[in-house]
Image (spheres, rainbow, N blue to C red):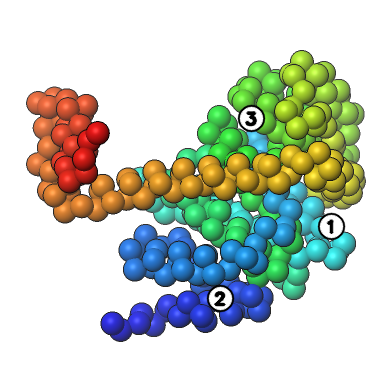
Amino acid sequence: MVKRKNRLSVEEYVEGILAGNRVVLSRAITLVESSLASDQHLAEEVVNRIMPHTGNSLRIGITGVPGVGKSTFIESFGKLVVDQGNKLAVLAIDPSSQKTKGSILGDKTRMEELSHNSNAFIRPTPAGAALGGVSAKTRESMLLCEAAGFNVIFIETVGVGQSEIMVKGMVDFFLLLMLSGAGDELQGIKKGIIEIADAIAITKADGDNIEASKKAKREYNNALHLFPLNDNGWRPQVKICSAVSKDGLADIWAMVQEYKTAMQANGFFEENRSNQRVNWFDEHVRYLLESRFFQQKEVKAGLIDMLPKIKNGEMSSISVARYLVDYFLKDIPND
């Protein structure tokens, strides 16, 4: 079999990643994002080989309402983290057009200073059809970055909403960015996202907006006290900050460190990681089954024949789905 020019061997990928080679790391992430069957098999081998070198980072999910300035916050906050001697990887998920499937991938250009820092790595990735504000391969990309020596991982999600809770299932700490004007925001934001946040940061707390940000902090604190205490014993905190003046950023980082220490002490940190690994298994089983289903040639042929009949109402969606799934599983005993 002829090896594709843009693909390395498993050994070359693994050696490059473990050596911290950014070019190889980028190519490895491209590999795991590929939908080609041959690439997926190669990617699985690479991920399996680097697994013993993963898990040593602090994983932080960051989301926020429109206009909150996520990229600006991440650049300033990321620089503070790097300046304290850490190696930071930012996995920035960009929204994909549901019509063209394309993505602008502009996050790296919005974090220009951080992207030029030798201890930071920024990887913009299109969300594609994945829900939850993350890419379908975000977990694998995160593991590759950990194996490459990055001890802090930021996952910047597409936006904010009920579906954003998926990122919570792959990080240690979940930070929600909000603007001042908390009363209006509390009405407009989904309850679920606040319930799963480990902290809320009110951004753009500078100039004439400082007092409004302090007022928003009080209102959010009052709202959070209406929720029951988290299972891990952590009471979500509210901070105010400015990515421009850098005020409040050190407090947020100190809070994240406090959280990590507390969760490691009570055993929740590793318990959460263990549960996330099982959830990853569940998600990947569903992903593989769906992929195999739509790739089977008989199913493809059936869809070509039956989709027009679904569209014109001649056949029901439920009956066609059951027929094709039963055909797909025809050789599997139904006990």
Local SS, label 3: helix
> What residue did someone put label 3 on?
193
Residue 311 is situated, as x and y percent measured from the top left of the image, at 17, 31
Q: Position of residue 142 (x, y in %)?
A: 60, 58
Q: Quadrant of residue 18?
A: bottom right
Which is nearer the N-term, disc 2 or disc 3?
2
* Residue 115 in sight here: no
Rendered residue at 70%/51% (across/down)? 59
Element type at mark 2? helix
Query: First in sequence: mark 1 or mark 3?
Result: 1
Local packing at callout 2 (Cα closer than 10 Å; few below 14, some 14-19, many 20+) is: many
Can residue 91 be seen? Answer: yes
The answer to which of 60 and 180 lies nearer the viewer is 60
| Among the 4 quarters of the image, the one containing residue 109 | bottom right
Relative height, residue 129 to residue 119 (above, below)? above
Instruction: In the rendered view, tell whether residue 193 sits above or below residue 304.
Output: above
| Upstream in sequence: badge 2 or badge 1 | 2
Q: Nearer the viewer, residue 109 or 120?
A: 120
Name the residue type under label 3.
Answer: Ile
Residue position marked by numbered label 2 in the rendering: 14
Residue position for label 1: 80
Q: Which mark is residue 46?
A: none
Mark 1 touches mark 3? (CB < 8 Å): no
Q: Amino acid at mark 1?
A: Leu
Q: Is residue 8 left or right of residue 324?
A: right
